[in-house]
């Protein structure tokens, strides 16, 4: 039995209440994921592609680019994306109501300023009526509370998938 004062590990996250934020966040994570895809050597089963769940959000983990390294981490508690490099450069981009085009411009501009020249396919994958990232001013919602609940669901889901996977022996 759960204590009344203990928050549920599975918060309410009704799709209709955060749909617009989800659609914006989906495009932002596709941009970051496509950077990881473009800069990481191909691995069978596309194991080089995913973003990984962290205690506070999602990360690319380390991306090796020649002798340099970078990573990008969404922190859904601080509501920011941090881009870090092995030579000590760092930029923090606020996650707030802003267009996908603005986010794309800031991410790609930061990577370019840090000396990482990367081109990605600008059209989102597996969405109806995709809008190229650099032209998308439609998706611009950001509800911090919903994103915090989403981060909690991500953490719980990762825990369950890790536990389930641990019994696989084949």
Image: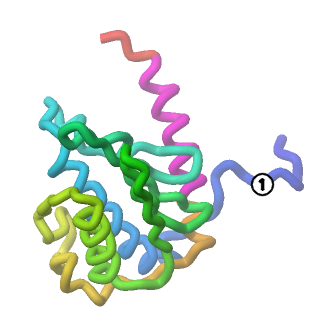
User: Which residues make up the magenta segment?
Assistant: 151-166
Horizontal side of 163 relative to 49 (left or right) equals right
Residue at 26 percent across and 72 percent down: it is 109
Quick check: is 80 in the magenta stretch? Answer: no
Dominant SS in magenta: helix
Residue 67 point in image, percent of width and height: 23, 37
In the figure, is residue 134 to the left or right of 95?
left
- The answer to which quarter of the image holds residue 140 is bottom left
User: At x 21% / y 76%, what residue is drawn?
Assistant: 133
Image position, residue 10 (x, y; %): 64, 52
Q: Is residue 165 within the magenta segment?
A: yes
Q: Mark 1 points at which residue?
A: 7
Name the quarter where the N terminus is drawn.
top right
* Residue 152 percent across, percent down from the top left: 60, 53
Taking depth in this image into account, of 84 and 167 the one nearest to the observer is 84
Please state, as top left, top right, bottom left or bottom right, where the C terminus lies in the image: top left
Q: Specify the farthest residue to the bottom.
A: 137
Q: Does residue 13 show up? A: no
The one of 145 and 14 positioned closer to us in this rendering:
145
**Foreground of the two, 139 or 34:** 34
Which image quarter: residue 22? bottom left
């Amino acid at each position: 039995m759960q204590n009344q004062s203990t928050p549920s590990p599975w918060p309410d996250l009704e799709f209709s209440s955060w749909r617009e934020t989800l659609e914006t966040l989906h495009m932002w994570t596709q941009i970051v994921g496509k950077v990881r895809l473009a800069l990481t050597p191909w691995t069978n089963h596309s194991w080089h592609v995913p973003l990984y769940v962290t205690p506070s959000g999602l990360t690319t983990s380390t991306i090796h680019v020649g002798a340099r390294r970078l990573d990008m981490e969404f922190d859904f508690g601080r509501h920011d994306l941090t881009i870090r490099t092995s030579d000590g450069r760092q930029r923090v981009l606020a996650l707030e109501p802003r267009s996908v085009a603005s986010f794309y411009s800031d991410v790609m501009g930061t990577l370019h300023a840090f000396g990482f020249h990367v081109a990605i396919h600008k059209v989102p994958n597996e969405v109806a009526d995709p809008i190229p990232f650099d032209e998308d001013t439609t998706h611009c919602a950001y509800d911090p509370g919903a994103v915090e609940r989403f981060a909690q669901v991500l953490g719980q889901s990762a825990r369950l998938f890790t536990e389930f996977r641990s019994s696989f022996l084949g």
